[in-house]
Amino acid sequence: MTPFESDLIALPEVQRLRYVRMCNINSLLVSGASEISRFEHTLGVMHLTKCWVAAHGIPESEGRDLIAAAALHDMQTGPFGHSMQYVLEDNTTPDDFVHEDIAHGRRSDYHQNTLASSSFSGKPFSAHSLLGKRMESVAAIIRGEGQYGPLISGTMDLDNIDNVVRLAFHVGVATDADRTIPLRLAQVLNASGGELVLPVSATDSVIRWQAIRTRLYSLLLNDWAEFSAKGMLTKAIEIAIKHDLIGADCWLMTDGAFLDFLDAKGLGEAQETRELVRRLRRGDLYDPIAIMESPDIDAYAAVSGAEAKKSIELELTRKSKGRGVRPLVHFILDKGKTERAIKVRLAESSESIVIGHSSSRLLCGLFVSHSRLNELDRERLLQLFSDVLREHGIGNAIPIPDPMGESPTDSQLSLL
């Protein structure tokens, strides 16, 4: 690294990412994904960006801004990444949270308006001091703006090219050959007029990257333990928000510090927060009744908030007629996650094409606090859940199979 790049890596806001998972939960079953840090990913995105700058002969000043954007693109990622972000977006908090907008963060309470009050391990955040007037340009790139923005924040950018292959390789659903895809794409990817530009010869790499993404997200979204843990953490955060224990400023915490905080604050009316966090830590997850998928994605906004889910849970408890059921429901919007269409302009002909298509489904998970229900009670509860979903405008919901239910080697080899 150059001295400038080393200074970027040494920033406390970047060093904090050593203790923030790249995955959105401390995974119980997909353990390869669980301990990769955002810091490791940041190094990968920086490396790809350096390769891109070198391959395209970018002037030094512009190259420095782009490399700085790669180093800082995740600096406002909260504990457990998108798990916290989605809760803050779906529920009312004192301030909005926009993790990719550094300028917005600086104006909002979660940056507390002064550099001195945003710190990590006793050292103030100092990217603004290091970059000076260039910080505005760097922040714009992170937001996806300008000539270079799509390379850091787009439908297929250097950020998600790295995170998909990195996670997939750690999990074990990528091959040695797949590891070369990020470097190949970084050599030829370009942006012009807000569009991605690629040579025809690179489209096969895009298709292969999409296939890796599908294999990975089929595990991360469909695995019952991932789903249950996300639902439990989400509920813990929602209860903490309801009782004014946390706000958008909690993004500064690391994963471990955030769990410690919820454990310590989960008292009195918020004691369920403590119970959920402690169960998460020891891998004592809520037991799955079903994970279902529906095409009715427009219903997500109506059911994803804390009060809406609580209403559904109370309705299930009432209709199950006191069988000791303590349900937990959780919804995930899979809009371009498992599968993502990539629009590119071909360098040779300037023709715009779309490679692949985007997934569009609503995932609906139902879990119970213990596994002592007999099979008949489980079937009744599943039927009740289906009925309640229909009452909330979610039809055609069908159970999806557990991706860990068969030999991963066999299923993944068939996809390869």
Image: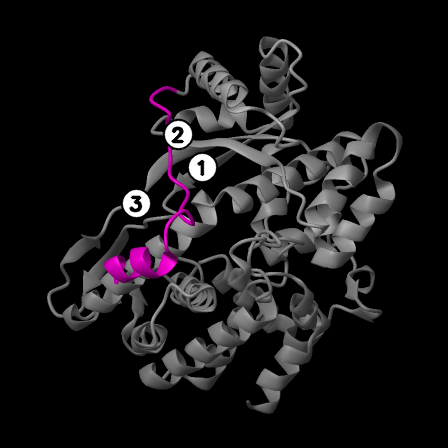
- For marks 2 and 1, give the CA distance: 7 Å
Q: Which image quadrant: the C terminus?
A: bottom left
Highlighted range, magenta: 395-416
Q: Would you name the residue on which mark 1 appears?
A: 333
- Looking at the image, which residue is at 37% across and 48% down? 338
Q: Nearer the viewer, residue 58 or 220?
A: 220
Choose between 10 and 113: the one closer to the eye. 10
Say above or below: 213 vs 48: above
* Mark 2 neighbour density, 10 Å: few (under 14) some (14–19) many (20 or more): some
Location of the N terminus by quadrant is bottom right
Circle 3 — which element? Answer: loop
The disc, 2 or 1, on the residue closer to the chain's N-terminal end is 2
Q: Amino acid at mark 3?
A: Ser
**Label placed on residue 27:** none
Q: Position of residue 355 (x, y in %)?
A: 21, 54
When the figure is inspected, residue 290 is found, relative to residue 352, above or below; the finding is: above
Examine the rendering and report whether any part of residue 137 can be seen: yes
Q: Residue 54: name its quadrant.
A: bottom left
Residue 323 percent coordinates (x, y): 64, 15
Residue 413 on the magenta span:
yes
Q: Distance of mark 1 from mark 3, alpha carbons?
A: 12 Å
Label of residue 297 in the image: 2
